[in-house]
Image (cartoon, grey):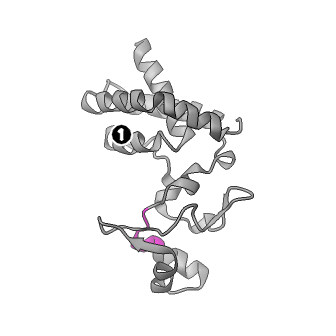
Amino acid sequence: MKAVNLRSFAQKVARHKATFRRFLTKVEKNPPVGLDKMAVEIDKQVWQEVDCLSCANCCKKMTPTFKKSDVDRISKHLGMTAAEFREKWLYLDKDGDWMNKSNPCQFLDLTTNMCSIYEVRPVDCAGFPHLTKKKMTDYIHWHKQNVAYCPATFSMVEKLMKHIEEK
C-alpha cells in the first residue's frame, strides 16, 4: 500500500473526472454481464494499493448522512443527549438528512487522519466508499460523486474501465 499524494490525486481527478463520469453513466444504463463480480475482484486490488489513513479526503471534504441510530449511538458514546449532539454538530439539509455543520469532520484527528469515534462512527462512514454493494448499478450515482474525493473510488473506476475495454 502506498500513501496517497493528494496534490497528484487532485490533478488526476481534473484530467479524468468527466471521462469517468461518462463511463459510469454508460455502465449504469447498460451494465456489462458480471459487473458485480468484477467489482468484487477490483475491490481486492484497490485495497492493496490505497492507504486511507494517508488521505482522509472523505472526512476532510465530505459529510456522512447521520441516521437516527447513528445520532443515538454516537451521542450516548459522547455522554450527550441526541438533541445536544444534533445542536452542536449537525444541520438538517433540504432532503431532511442530518449532516455535519462543517468540514473537516469534527471527529477527524488531523495529525493522524484517524477517527476519534471510529468504533461508533456513522454507518455511512463504515461503508464508505461503497465499492462492493450487492448491486453495483444502485451505487453508481455515488461513485460518480466520490471519484472526485476518494482515491479508492478513482482507482476502482480506472480499473473497471480498463477491464471492460479489454473484453
Q: Is residue 29 left or right of residue 91?
A: left
Outermost residue on the top side: it is 166
Q: How many callouts does the rendering have?
A: 1
Give the crowd class for mark 1: few <14, some 14-19, many >=20 residues within 10 Å.
some
Q: Quadrant of residue 65?
A: bottom left
| Residue 151 percent across, percent down from the top left | 56, 39
Q: Is residue 10 left or right of residue 147?
A: right
Quadrant in which the C terminus is drawn: top left
Residue placed under numbered mark 1 in the picture:
140
**In the displayed structure, would residue 104 be above or below residue 49?**
below
| Residue 104 percent across, percent down from the top left | 58, 61
Outermost residue on the left side: it is 29
Quadrant in which the N terminus is drawn: top right
Question: Is residue 69 one of those drawn in magenta?
Answer: yes
- Tell me the SS state at disc 1: helix
| Residue 71 percent across, percent down from the top left | 47, 75
Q: Quadrant of residue 5?
A: top right
**Whether residue 50 can be seen here:** no
What residue is at 47 percent from the left and 28 percent from the top? 16
The residue type indicated by label 1 comes to: Ile
Magenta-colored span: 65-70
Q: Nearer the viewer, residue 75 or 92?
A: 92
Q: Nearer the viewer, residue 104 or 54?
A: 104
What residue is at 31 percent from the left and 32 percent from the top? 25
Question: Is residue 75 one of those drawn in magenta?
Answer: no
| Residue 22 percent across, percent down from the top left | 34, 29
**Whether residue 139 can be seen here:** yes
Q: Quadrant of residue 10?
A: top right
**In the displayed structure, would residue 114 be above or below residue 29?**
below
What residue is at 62 percent from the left and 51 percent from the top? 56
